[in-house]
Amino acid sequence: MSYSDILNVVNQYGSGMQNLYANKANNLNNVNFNAGPVNPNSSGAFTPKTARDIYSSSTNVNNPMASFSDYKPYSGENLMMQGMKGMQYANIAGKISPYLASGASDLYGATIGKGTGLAGAQNFNLGPAAAVYGFTQNQNPYDYTQTEKLGTYASTAMAASQVAKLAGVGATTGIGGATVAPILGMNPFVLLGSLILGSIWSKKKKRKAKANIKRVKAEIKEQQDDIYSSREDQVKEMRQDMLSQQTTDLYNQRQGRYDNQYGGAYAEEGMKMDENIVAEFTGNELIVNDQDKVEKGLASGNYAMASAPIRKAMNNKQLTPGPETHQGNPMPVDIEGNIYVGGGKLPFKAKKGSGIYDHATDQFKSTMTDKEIAMVAQENINKWESNGMA
């Protein structure tokens, strides 16, 4: 076909071809490139869980003290709530005061007064004292403020003053009928007693606030310990999964080098390495790199010569680790004789002509004689020959 023939074809069919492929190009967005689902396990980068998943899914610590971090009891709506609390306390105390006074008066008349009641029973009222206490004691159980302390002292003194009046103890009544000067309109002995009582109650409330803080901190620590323990377990599990995935990927990479119709040998029945050194081991295989000396010793009946390379391999711990299973413990061997296990290489190689003795610890013992070792080696060689692995 000449160049002119090509030009004629282009001129004749070019416009149609241009329209055809132009339409195809314009419709590429409508082409379905769905190649089927992607298996995440096919990628070495895939992990079932990441550190971000672990830390973002952790349960938050419950800290009840945090809700009082911005709490201001005597401002805004909180001030109104404190006032309502004081009024509520005053209302309750005002209602029960007559009953308390009546009961105290009757008890006094029956025991000490011999029929006469308490003169101050009619004016007894704990309402004002309760109002001061309710207004000054805030809603935060994790602190004890100066306002609460002063409120405790004041309300205790006011309540003590009412009790003193109920008992007929006036502001100027002293010991033995003597007259004393009142302090803040109260009997000084009553005031002193109320201050002592207020101090006791104040210290008790302060200890309670500290105990609440200690309890919450202990609960927070327990929650944190549980979270840390859970995170640690999840991280360990994640690492194990990643290591398992990496080991599998490494094995698959190694397996691709010899998993074909040309090479590769499984050392289930033991073997002798030949030119095609690529293979797969499991565990508990003794690698004897001086196998030719073993065979020379057997051929000449020199048991010491035959057993020496095997003893040397045993002493050098040239033993593949792990369980004797290809499925659970595959150890690929590359073309250079490197044996791969757990993401790394063993410190010894399986060289050309090496003897690979399976179930080594069952076959060979350090207490065996040279002849016993030599005979076991001969049995293995006979087995290899029958299996075509010699």
Image (tube, rainbow, N blue to C red):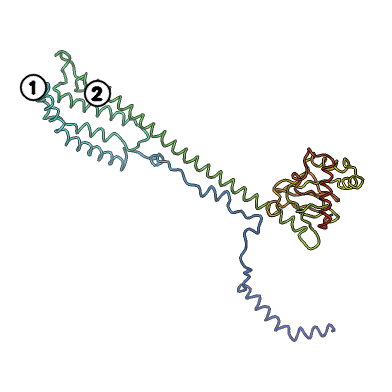
Q: Amino acid at mark 2?
A: Ser
Q: Residue at the location (22% across, 31% down)? A: 129
Quarter of the image containing the N terminus? bottom right
In the displayed structure, 84 sits above or below 114; it is: below
Q: Furthest residue to the left?
A: 115
Q: Furthest residue to the right?
A: 300
Percent coordinates x, y for residue 100 in the rendering: 16, 31
| Residue count near mark 2 (Cα–Cα under 10 Å), binned few <14, some 14–19, many ≥20 | many
Q: CA distance from mark 2 to mark 1?
A: 29 Å
Percent coordinates x, y for residue 73 in the rendering: 32, 38
Q: Please give the residue where the numbered disc 1 appears in the rendered image.
A: 114
Q: Amino acid at mark 1?
A: Lys
Q: Residue at the location (53% across, 42% down)? A: 229
Q: Please give the residue where the numbered disc 2 appears in the rendered image.
A: 194
**Quadrant of the image occupied by residue 93:** top left
Percent coordinates x, y for residue 357 in the rendering: 79, 48
In the displayed structure, 319 sits above or below 3; it is: above
Q: Secondary structure at mark 2?
A: helix
Determine whether, in the image, residue 322 is placed left or right of residue 58: right
Percent coordinates x, y for residue 270 in the rendering: 79, 52
